Amino acid sequence: MPEPLLYLKAMVAAAIVSAMTVLAMVLARRHTSTTWLNLSCVLGIGLGLVVGYGVVSLRLAWPPVNGLDRFLTITVPLALGIELIAGFQNVPRWFAWLLRMSLAATIPRILLHGSVYLSDSAEGWTPWQTGAVLVLCGALLAGVWSLLSWLSQRSPGISIPLALCLPILCAGLTVMMAGYIKGGVAAFPLVATLVATTIAARLLAQRSVALANLSVPAIVGVGVVGLFGLLFLGRFFGRLSTECALAMLLAPLFCWVTEMPPLRHRQPWLVGSLRLVLVAIPLLVVLAAAKRDFDRDMAPLLRNTEAPTFRLPREH
């Protein structure tokens, strides 16, 4: 059963570890470079996630045996490693983006490995269905990742990472209501560590003129990969609908509305606030629909102690 207090403790622990890691690493150096700040953020996110998932006792198997295991032990570490490499100034941008797009193309296949969808059973997909799903999902991830990274470079600040955290939190809640509790729980430490890392990086960037308008691609990259992975798990191993998953994945792109000429040159706090509001509107609609479906389909099962509470993920 869900344990809100435990999830809150995990979020607080993850946030503290992430923020303290970034602050300690940057403040330990007299001169902070963009490379060092990016490295600090990558390490802060990684340590925060380890601590957060440890608090909620999210047991992961190695070698991984299901989609959630592969998401947390393969996909997220790969995203962190790629953003670490991309943060070095002598790494060509084309090479960094080649790594990112390669990861985007392979994540759907990684998460579906060993699942019933790729088996020879009656529920398995045909080759063309498998190819279509993998290509479309990979293209969606690559498109969202590219557009949000581009926007964060055009208009640096904390609004883009925070706008990513909103759908991640929404994804956690909806995936839980869709019947995949462990998949939903994975969202909470991720949200906490991304928010804490974003705020810490912003505070440190304000101390240096050279870093004042800096965006940290690692935060956006890990956030997009995390959001996609959670929604993918909820869609294929839970009861999350395709429409809800797409709405949450594409919601951060509403931030691009603020690039319209009447809004682009407004004060940064106004632009950032508007972005968060624009992203929050479709998420509230999704949450309301998910709560309605939960009350209709799942709540009766919770009241019946003899019935199975949640459907198990279809892994093998």
Image: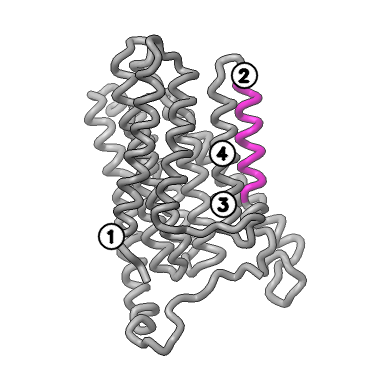
Q: Which of 110 and 163 is in front in this view?
A: 110
Q: Which residue is labeled 2 in the image? A: 91
Query: What residue is drawn where x is 34% and y is 47%?
Result: 166
Q: Circle 1: is it few (<14), some (14-19), or many (20+) Cα within 10 Å? A: few
Tag 1 and tag 2, C-beta contact below 8 Å: no
- Tag 3, which secondary structure? helix
- Tag 1, which secondary structure? helix
Q: Which residue is labeled 1 in the image? A: 5
Q: What residue type is labelled 4?
A: Ala
Query: What residue is drawn where x is 30% and y is 44%?
Result: 278
Q: What residue type is labelled 2?
A: Val
Name which of mark 1 and mark 2 comes first in the sequence. 1
Task: Give the alpha-carbon distance from disc 1 to disc 2, as whole Å.
Answer: 43 Å
Q: Which residue is labeled 4 in the image? A: 79
Name which of mark 3 and mark 2 comes first in the sequence. 3
Which mark is drawn over residue 71?
Answer: 3
Indicate whether residue 102 is drawn in magenta: yes
Name which of mark 1 and mark 3 comes first in the sequence. 1
Q: What residue type is labelled 3?
A: Phe
